[in-house]
């Protein structure tokens, strides 16, 4: 078993638990096809990074989502940390992973999405109660 397959095991299980067996289907609409095209125009997948690995804590919602991820899914947090440190190491050396270990669009799990949606709902509810209570 390669390192990449081992590292993505927990992330893929988490994605299946959230989104079902097929995390990302083949792009059907023009918008989805463009997203896939845009995904492959970046180099983060060549370094083994997922899209949400590139999110950093500048925004309060992302910072809170990462805090919740670290508490509720520690294995997923460890995988994320490993992917980031490996990507930094490869980037410093001006190298990419071997082609068979590149992350595919279909396997890129938006693992922060449930946390971000929950935070967005909480913020909307807080705004609602601020308006009601004046």
Image: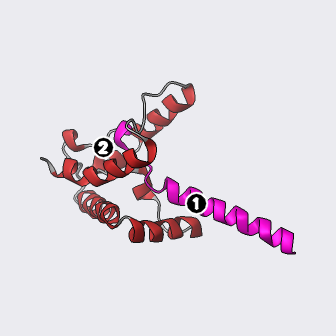
Q: Nearer the viewer, residue 40 or 24?
A: 24
How many marks overall?
Answer: 2
Residue 40: x and y in percent read 39, 38
Residue 28: x and y in percent read 50, 24
Q: Which residues are magenta?
A: 105-134
Q: Is residue 105 left or right of residue 129?
A: left
The residue that label 1 is drawn on is: 118
Q: Nearer the viewer, residue 105 or 44?
A: 105
Residue 118 colored in magenta in the image: yes
Residue 75: x and y in percent read 30, 63
User: What is the quadrant of the C terminus in the image?
Assistant: bottom right
Give the residue at x 78% y 65%. Answer: 128
Give the residue at x 22% y 59%. Answer: 93
> Looking at the image, can residue 118 be seen?
yes
* Magenta highlight: main SS: helix
Residue 39 colored in magenta in the image: no
* Label 2–label 1 contact, CB within 8 A: no
Give the residue at x 29% y 65%. Answer: 78
Label 2: few (<14), some (14–19) or many (≥20) C-alpha neighbours in 10 Å:
many
Q: Residue furthest left?
A: 1
Q: Which mark is residue 103?
A: 2
Above or below residue 35? Residue 92 is below
- What is the distance, in whole Å, between disc 2 and disc 1 at their CAs? 27 Å
> Looking at the image, can residue 109 be seen?
no
Label 1: few (<14), some (14–19) or many (≥20) C-alpha neighbours in 10 Å:
few
- Whichever of labels 2 and 1 marks the residue nearer the N terminus, that label is 2
Secondary structure under badge 2? loop
Secondary structure under badge 1? helix
Give the residue at x 68% y 65%. Answer: 123
Q: Residue furthest bottom?
A: 134
């Amino acid at each position: 078993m390669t390192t990449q397959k081992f590292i993505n095991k927990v992330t893929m299980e988490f994605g299946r638990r959230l989104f079902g067996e097929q995390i990302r289907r083949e792009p059907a609409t023009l918008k989805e096809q463009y997203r896939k095209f845009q995904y492959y125009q970046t180099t983060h997948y060549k370094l083994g990074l997922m899209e949400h690995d590139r999110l950093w804590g500048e925004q309060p919602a992302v910072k809170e989502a990462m805090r919740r991820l670290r508490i509720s899914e520690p294995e997923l947090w460890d995988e994320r940390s490993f992917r980031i440190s490996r990507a930094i190491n490869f980037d410093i050396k001006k190298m990419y992973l071997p082609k068979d270990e590149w992350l595919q669009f279909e396997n890129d799990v938006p693992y922060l999405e449930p946390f971000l949606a929950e935070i967005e709902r909480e913020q909307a509810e807080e705004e609602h109660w601020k308006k009601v209570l004046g």
